[in-house]
Amino acid sequence: MHVVLLSGSPAARSRTEVLLDYVRQRLQARQIEVSLLRVRDFPAEDLLHANFESEAVQRLQAAVASADGLVVGTPVYKASLTGALKVLLDLLPERALAHKVVLPLASGGSPAHLLAVEYALKPVLAALKAQEMLPGVFAVDKQISYAEGDRPAQLDDELRERLDEALDQLLAALARRPAPIDPNLLNDRLINARWSI
């Protein structure tokens, strides 16, 4: 089982990445392979010019193609996902999320941005044909504290409870996800059908 975590935060110090780090730890504790891709690690020129030939973009496409599930996290800017994340998602093929389970996450300064998950992030993910879109999790910035000295980053109890519930839903969705059809099996059936005619 492989889950890709996609961070839409352009900042090195990011509450969204604190959320994704919590997700990573929980999934790895369940023996799930996790890959983290950050929008800030992609060359800006490749994003701005939609360079599909870029090695970084091809690695993104390959990682998403190999994933069983995706957790997409973004800070909320101007009541929406980050522009950099939107540009990155635009570099994926049209059906990139077909046969994948997707969990959207967002963090923002106030509960006023709560619906950004529903009205900004989910439609973009749905356009990429996500097989199953889970209810998103929105975190208010004050629920997330950065690491300070020896103290690790922390989430408040209510947020941690909602994230745990979302991760349980993700794991259940991954477990019931139908296995992809082996293309060789289809080819063998076609060859056998031709010989029997």
Image (cartoon, rainbow, N blue to C red):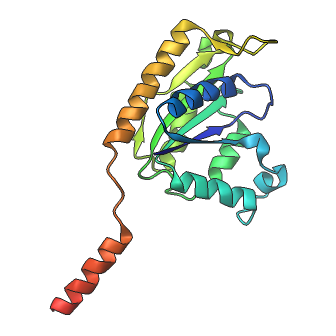
The furthest residue to the left: 197
Q: Nearer the viewer, residue 9 or 186?
A: 186
Residue 20, percent across and down?
62, 29
In this rendering, the count of numbered labels is: 0
For residue 92, say whether it is visible: no
Residue 139, percent across and down?
59, 17
Q: Nearer the viewer, residue 98 or 173?
A: 173
Q: Nearer the viewer, residue 128 or 166?
A: 166
Residue 150 left/right relative to 108: right
Q: Please determine whether, in this image, residue 11 is positioned above or below residue 56.
A: above
Residue 152 left/right relative to 103: right
Q: Residue at x 82, y 49 (%)?
A: 44
For residue 95, say whether it is visible: yes
Q: Residue at x 53, y 14 (%)?
A: 160
Q: Please determine whether, in this image, residue 24 is positioned above or below residue 174.
A: above
Q: Residue at x 49, y 34 (%)?
A: 103
Q: Nearer the viewer, residue 42 or 106?
A: 42
Residue 139 left/right relative to 171: right
**Image quarter for residue 114?**
top right
Residue 182, percent across and down?
36, 66
Residue 119 left/right relative to 196: right
Q: Residue at x 43, y 20 (%)?
A: 165
Residue 59, percent across and down?
67, 57
Q: The N terminus lies in which quarter of the figure?
A: top left
Q: The C terminus lies in which quarter of the figure?
A: bottom left
